[in-house]
Image: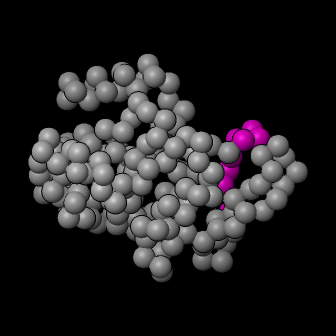
Amino acid sequence: MEKLKEFLAAPDKMQDEFWESDVLIWIDWREYDEDIIQYFNEKLPDEDEISFKCVDIDKERGVDIILKKNGVETPIPYVDDRMDRDTTLKSIQEYLAPKYQIRCYLESLGGDTLAFCVYPTGQWQQLEQEFGSDKVAYYFVPIRPDINLFEMDMNEVFRLLKVREKN
């Protein structure tokens, strides 16, 4: 969390260093969804890793990802017959909540690869207390059920960035 604090204390000065840090989880729009889960598991303590399995199915996508928590197995609810990064991220967030929160690093918007951070919810709250919730929200947006970052068209990205700059 120190890198995140350093960045929020001096974002202009620390931008490049933060961009290259191991704090960020980079996800390309073409990633395999099971790889995305592995990227988050690499940042989580062993006891909090996401338990999952891939199951072959008779659909065009060929596989379902089943998340397992507290003895309950839940498939990631992909719409239609395709996997998509947004649904995977929302499912990971739901799995990790309320203990952890995933946030998108908004400076990565506009490309085909987006950056994310995962930290305990309490640490995000500490950052909001220390630096102000507006400043934290300016750089990091929580993954919520109503957000679609990978499916956002460029006009929406530019609109969001413009609103962000005004605030």
Residue 101, by quadrant, is: bottom left
Residue 109 spot, x, y in % from top left: 39, 35
Residue 102 spot, x, y in % from top left: 41, 55
133 left or right, relative to 97: left
> At x 47% / y 79%, what residue is drawn?
46
Residue 56 spot, x, y in % from top left: 82, 59
Above or below, 11 against 127 in this view is above
* Residue 81 among magenta residues: yes
Residue 24, by quadrant, is: bottom left
Which segment did they paint magenta? 74-82
Does residue 104 appear in the picture of this structure? Answer: yes
Residue 158, by quadrant, is: top left
* Prevalent SS, magenta region: loop
Residue 118 spot, x, y in % from top left: 38, 60
83 left or right, relative to 55: left
40 left or right, relative to 35: left
